[in-house]
Image (spheres, rainbow, N blue to C red):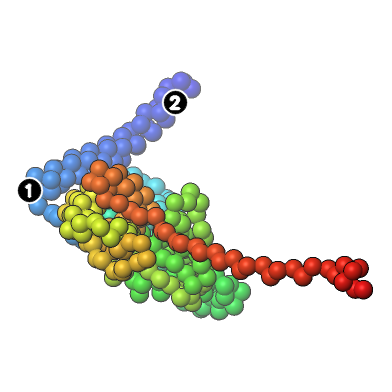
């Protein structure tokens, strides 16, 4: 008898869970099929540019049909089973929370993608800053939490009031941190400093900007393997030289001198050819147009400046290095002389005065 009762209980449990399980599995299957069909339709029939907000939104919606189908299946499964009102209410809270978190996540991913896309349009081929993205994503998730609390019946007015009062206390205690946060936002929104720019502060620090966080700006000096971390408010209040604005191109000037008996037309042609070869090899810029400008009749040479256009600030040392080596070899082949400085030193010696002989005893007498 005990065995039959136990089998009856198991059969009743199985019968009770069979319908909800089938509903959930069916809804999950429909969601998977719908997600694949939507992605296939977008890939084959919709020409969406990757640099638009529509593409960002579609990517943010990846996997959402599956989740919503699962949630809908759970709602139906709960309605198909007779359970206590308390448990039903608890499950409803959990499902609503899941829905809000999903929507919030989609919005956060969309905003993050749009902000990143906007900065990539302004700074092509450069990494994004993390400060503005983190602040916007944090605000979106806070709004999602407030919506959930409001659904639970928890009044958010006292929370906002307490947050305002607490915010004042936190602001007084964290003045240094807040100053760096707002200074970082100012740097980003003013676009005076962008990720990838090479800057030099009035205090002497210089390097390429790699990131602007909520407190610090990190830069890497030219040719260094270390990172310099500077507070945002220090950069906001400093005199800054930005070598990447208004354009990232720069002109490198290399002074050269040749002998007075040189053929200046030949010198100019050979120098420009050598400069083009170096720029095509080092800077990967075969269309660069270097210039030669004669500047001075010096003591032992005719001086001129070679202007080398470059699109990479970090490569200027290597460009000068390779150009001087290549130009020296080419001048030797062409018979162009780079004179040594010559100075003639004339040393004059005055004749020593004749010494007066000492008087002898005879002369004294």
Q: Is residue 363 above or below residue 68?
A: below
Q: What residue is rendered at 50% in x and 54% in y?
A: 227
* x 9%, y 52%: residue: 47
- x and y percentages locating residue 246 in the rendered image: 28, 70
Name the secondary structure under disc 2: helix
Image location of residue 282, percent across then percent down: 29, 47
Which mark sits nearer the N-terminus, 2 or 1?
2
For residue 270, side relative to residue 3 (left or right) = left
Between tags 2 and 1, which lies in front?
A: 1
Residue neighbourhood size for the residue with mark 2, other residues' Cα within 10 Å, grouped as few (<14), some (14–19), many (≥20): few
* Disc 1 target residue: 45
> With 63 as the anchor, is 269 left or right in this view?
left
* Residue at figure coordinates x 37%, y 28% from the top left: 11
Residue 317, given in percent of the width and then of the height, sits at: 38, 53
Q: Nearer the viewer, residue 357 or 185?
A: 357
Q: Quadrant of the C terminus?
A: bottom right
| Image x and y of residue 219, in percent | 45, 59
Q: Mark 2 — residue? A: 5
């Amino acid at each position: 008898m005990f065995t039959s009762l136990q089998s009856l209980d198991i059969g009743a449990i199985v019968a009770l869970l069979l319908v909800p399980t089938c509903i959930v599995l069916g809804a999950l299957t429909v969601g998977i099929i719908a997600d694949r069909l939507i992605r296939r339709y977008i890939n084959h029939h919709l020409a969406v540019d990757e640099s638009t907000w529509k593409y960002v939104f579609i990517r943010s919606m990846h996997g959402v049909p599956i989740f919503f189908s699962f949630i809908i299946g759970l709602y139906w499964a709960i309605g198909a089973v007779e359970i206590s009102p308390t448990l039903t209410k608890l499950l409803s809270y959990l499902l609503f929370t899941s829905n809000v978190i999903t929507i919030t996540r989609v919005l956060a991913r969309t905003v993050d993608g749009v902000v990143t896309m906007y900065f990539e349009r302004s700074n092509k081929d450069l990494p994004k800053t993390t400060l503005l993205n983190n602040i916007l994503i944090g605000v979106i998730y806070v709004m999602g939490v407030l919506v959930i609390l409001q659904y639970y019946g928890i009044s958010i007015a006292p929370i906002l009031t307490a947050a305002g009062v607490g915010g004042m206390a936190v602001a007084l205690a964290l003045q240094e941190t807040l100053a760096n946060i707002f200074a970082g936002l100012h740097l980003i929104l003013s676009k005076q400093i962008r990720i990838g720019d090479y800057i030099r502060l009035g205090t002497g620090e210089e390097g390429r900007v790699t990131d602007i966080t909520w407190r610090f700006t990190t830069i890497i000096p030219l040719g260094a393997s270390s990172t310099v971390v500077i507070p945002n408010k220090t950069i906001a209040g400093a005199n800054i030289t930005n070598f990447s604005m208004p354009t990232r191109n720069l002109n490198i000037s290399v002074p050269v001198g040749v002998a007075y008996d040189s053929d200046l037309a030949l010198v100019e042609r050979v120098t420009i050819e050598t400069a083009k070869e170096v720029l095509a090899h080092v800077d990967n810029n075969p269309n660069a147009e270097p210039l030669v400008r004669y500047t001075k009749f010096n003591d032992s040479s005719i001086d001129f400046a070679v202007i080398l256009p470059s699109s990479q600030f970090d490569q200027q040392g290597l460009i000068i290095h390779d150009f001087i080596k290549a130009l020296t070899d080419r001048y030797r082949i062409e018979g162009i002389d780079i004179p040594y400085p010559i100075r003639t030193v004339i040393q004059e010696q005055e004749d020593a005065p004749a010494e007066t002989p000492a008087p002898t005893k005879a002369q004294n007498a």
